[in-house]
Image: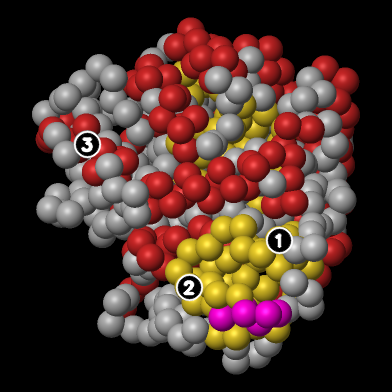
Amino acid sequence: MAATWLNDAVFYEIYPQSFFDSNGDGIGDIPGMTQKLDYILSLGCNALWINPCFDSPFKDAGYDVRDYKKVAPRYGSNEDLIHFFREAHRRGIRVLLDLVPCHTSEEHPWFRESCREAENEYSHRYIWTDSCWTQPQGIPFVGGEAPRDGCYILSFFKSQPALNFGFGNPTASWQQKAGSPATLETREAIWDVMRFWLEQGCDGFRVDMAGALVKADTPDQAYTQAVYRDLRQRLDRDFPEAALVAEWNVPKHSLNCGFDMDFYLSWAGNGYHSLMRNYDPADYPAGPDRSYFKADSGADPMHFLAEYLPNYLDTCGKGLWCFITGNHDTTRPRFNLTPEELKIAYSFLFTMPGAPFLYYGDEIGMRYRRLPNKEGGFNRTGSRTPMQWTGGKNLGFSQGAPEALYLPVDPAEDAPTVQAQEADPNSLLNYTRAVIALRHSRPDLQARSPFQVYFAQPGSRLLAYRRGKLLCVVNPGRETLALELDRPYAPLFTQGQAELSGNTLAIQGFAVLTPRG
Ligand code: GLC
Ligand code: CA
């Protein structure tokens, strides 16, 4: 584990097309991101994850890469990105780019070559069956579209053919064993991309669909793990401070093969989901919301702990399983939680182990909006709208015509903005800053400091956990509850009501306590 800077890292995720438009064409861009670095610093964030900003036909918002080594012209140039790295570093901010290793765009030159009838260098860069009549079983594929006689396998949308990292357990002659020469060439090609950007100054990568590299892998994904173990060795040799975060959500695999971090993703029914998004978006707000952080849900944190604890204990000391406020694929947490509820949720997210990730706009509680599909976003589109900076034109996102914007800004009269919340000491923005500052000020609250449950019980809204010698207590409900403490404490940080009398804490909201005496 080389990247020591992760100990105190707080990440901010930027969706580049929606962050800040510097030239009035309606699309966020890299010079715009550079202009906003001081704002990011003011949040207390010292690391960034930038969604894909590479040349692309944008059928999946840039996750369909056409040229890994070229910044998409709509965002600027490679020089702009290199300048951005420099300006970020000058402020002590690290930058992770998004690496998409499982697939490319169907317009990538590698794929164009791979589609040719005549055998060439790229024939096995993707996964093809040996005739167009041989159809892969149980894997999405396309047949009959290319001159080449074969079907090719898809990784996500139709526009995203799967790169060939082979099969763990090949069952047909067209399936290559993971680790065979053609699959090693794919690995080299991805390493070449990583090295290219690391040499330009990026600090690592968020790895897209990290667990999906090798098809028909073993249950513990041994062949996929082998690829990352190799890449990690190369990083340790050439870029020892580089960090990798996986979009995998299987920390016992990802943190075992060289990832510094994995995301605790929002998967229906899982532990994280039960905290923040335990409702049916189709009938919300008519239907029930059983999220732990919803004030009136009555929910306890047991479902979350039953998943989190064993994974945490399994991977403790190996790497970080990271909490997110949301991301470009989830609904915004403000969809179902009020700003006051968000304050309690963020208190928890920013005092848990791992490196927390704040999705742009969640610090002001930007809303989720039901919008028509944009660039393959579908239901995700509503979480990808322009950042709301001011009360001015296009909420300060762009000087362009409103019709030219990547997505419309929030038309609500009370649309939250940075400007309005800067001026309000009780705003979600200023609260988020305070919680992040608290984390920076206390090594006990940082990434690798020990975590232990102090109190949780079926049917109880209370959750108390130790971080190092500190005690964090959460009660997201409306009723004040009593918690017996094991020794005298003094309050270090409180939100809502938190009163100590003797060794009893009466709490509604959130508190961090420090041992006294
Ligand atoms: C990941 C990305 C998502 C993208 C998909 C395919 O899940 O987060 O936005 O559509 O991979 O690359
Ligand atoms: Ca622009």
The residue lying at 34 percent from left, 84 percent from top is 287
**How crowded is the residue under tag 3: few (<14 C-alpha within 10 Å), some, or many (20+)?**
some
Answer whether labels 2 and 1 touch (C-beta < 8 Å): no
Q: Decide: is 203 above or below 394.
A: above
Secondary structure, mark 2, is strand
Residue 70 in view (yes/no): no
Residue on which the image places disc 1: 514
With 397 as the anchor, is 468 left or right in this view?
Answer: right
The magenta segment: 501-506
Q: Which mark is residue 390?
A: 3
Residue 488: give x, y in percent of width and height: 75, 72
Image quarter for residue 8?
Answer: top right
Q: Which comes sooner in the sequence, label 2 or label 1?
A: 2
Quarter of the image with the N terminus is top right
Q: Which mark is residue 497?
A: 2
Q: Is residue 229 above or below residue 400?
A: below
Q: Crowding near pointer 2: few (<14 within 10 Å), some, many (20+)?
A: some
- Is residue 502 part of the magenta span, yes or no? yes
The residues bearing labels 2 and 1 have C-alpha atoms spaced at a distance of: 17 Å
The amino acid on which the numbered mark 3 sits, given as a three-letter code, is: Thr
For the point 84% across and 64% down, which residue is it?
Answer: 313
